Amino acid sequence: MNLLKQIPKVDKVLGWEGIQTLLENHPRPVVIRAVRTALENLRNRALRQEGERAQFTEEAILEQIGREIGSLSARKLKRLVNGTGVVIHTNLGRSPLPERIREALDEVAFGYSNLEFDLASGERGSRYAHVEEILCELTGAEAALVVNNNAAAVLLALSSLAAGREVIVSRGELVEIGGSFRIPDVMRQSGAILREVGATNRTHPGDYSAAVTQDTGLLLKVHCSNFAVVGFTAEVSAEQLVELGKQHALPVLADVGSGNLVELSRRLGCNEPTVQEFVDAGVDVITFSGDKLLGGPQAGIIIGRKALLAPMKKHPLLRAVRIDKLTLAALEGTLQLYRDERQALQEIPTLRMLTVPLEELADKAKRIAAELQKVVRGNVQLSLVEGFSQVGGGALPLLQLPTVLIAIAAGTMSAQEIEQTMRLSPVPVIGRIFKGAFLLDPRTILEEDIPALTAALQGMNP
Ligand SMILES: *Cc1c(COP(=O)(O)O)cnc(C)c1O
């Protein structure tokens, strides 16, 4: 109770000379909030009988207020080190952008641009035109349109192609992507009527044919993304669906999810069709994300037949889901790298991380571990262990990419304690815990992040 009496009133603290200095350098509301929080913390400590007299002096209180101001003024959204080995980690911002596009982003962000201005005619232009040509060139599609994300792309495509009409989709493809994006819900939102066919594991072309009525407006195919149907399965291919579409004079929409533009199947030993394969199969409209396998910014890309995209370009929903200029600049820059596949694989971080050879990862693990070894205290132990990385982002859920992990042990600290310490570092480091060990995967650690990682480990005090 004695300590409680030591806690000054807010007004008194605001009169302290030390506070005047803080007020000169920080906005008044921030200082007042910091004072309140610091005093509140002291009160709680005193009530829990945890306080030490030294923490209740003017000098110590001022120091705590200073720390509070620091944390109030710090950016909430900040860079961190992804040591999880999940390459397309939705919680960690999905794809880091290629260094090569920094200049393009910088130019558009800090100046005016021809976002919706046609330089040739001097008249109003379309923001969507900037990337249409390159998307058509890369995919072989007739037309293209970009929106805020793939969820918006699917919503816009369904609203425009099938509002008030039935959409036939296989039961095995009624997926939930996460974050409440579920195909049946999006369908309802668009005004289209879901007509599910087949069984969970098997759907046949005849199932679609039998479901077609005069109310049918569209045939839909959805990439399974984050789950796999294995065992006794049958899926109607894009080619078969296109054939059915022709027979019944119905358009075919494919939500291919991850948006893979380079041949990854052979490189990764998996089966992930490219966007071009869907175009070649004759699918009328295709949607995919900009920040999954494509490795660009968050965006939704719609490609397909001109006649079907034209109404989407005039749809009232388009304005609500429109892409912003920073995204557009980043997307254009990323797409340009795809003109040369080797360059795309080298310079787009997502593609580079997915395709880096194991020997290179092993070298990187050794090199990072050697850097870390220089700063750690005696009882911190670093070792290398074999393991697996994941693609993430709802792509290729079964694919296990072999990697070499850095395992960190620290005296009596548990893996959970190490995890927490690393996560709460000034530049947070996110790793994973497996079988009681704290692990970092070099696959997703960017070269520029190594100093921050070293600093985080240096700050650990077992
Ligand atoms: C990821 C995904 C979406 C959602 O895309 P966002 O860009 O996250 O909005 C939709 N459909 C499929 C099949 C997906 O994999």
Image (cartoon, rainbow, N blue to C red):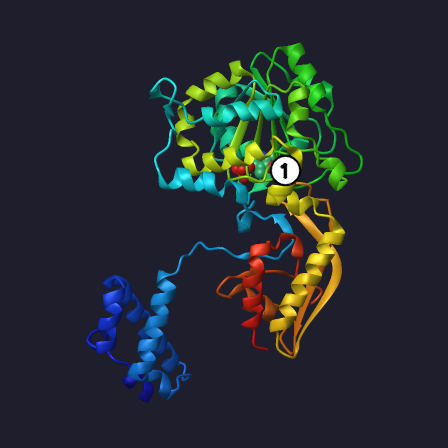
Amino acid type of disc 1? Gln
Quarter of the figure with residue 459: bottom right
Which residue sits at x=61%, y=74%?
376
**Closer to the camera, 334 or 243?**
334
Residue 412: x percent and y percent? 64, 78
The image shows residue 215 at horizontal and vertical percentages of: 56, 14
Q: Nearer the viewer, residue 6 or 258?
A: 258
In the foreground, 200 or 231: 231
Q: Is residue 58 visible?
A: yes
Please indicate, yes or no, whether residue 225 appears anywhere in the rendered image.
no
Quarter assignment of residue 83: bottom right
Q: Mark 1 — residue?
A: 343
Q: Quadrant of residue 44?
A: bottom left
| Residue drawn at x 48%, y 26% as measured from the top left | 156
**65 relative position to 254: left or right:** left
How many discs mark residues in the rendered view?
1
Q: Nearer the viewer, residue 239 or 183?
A: 239
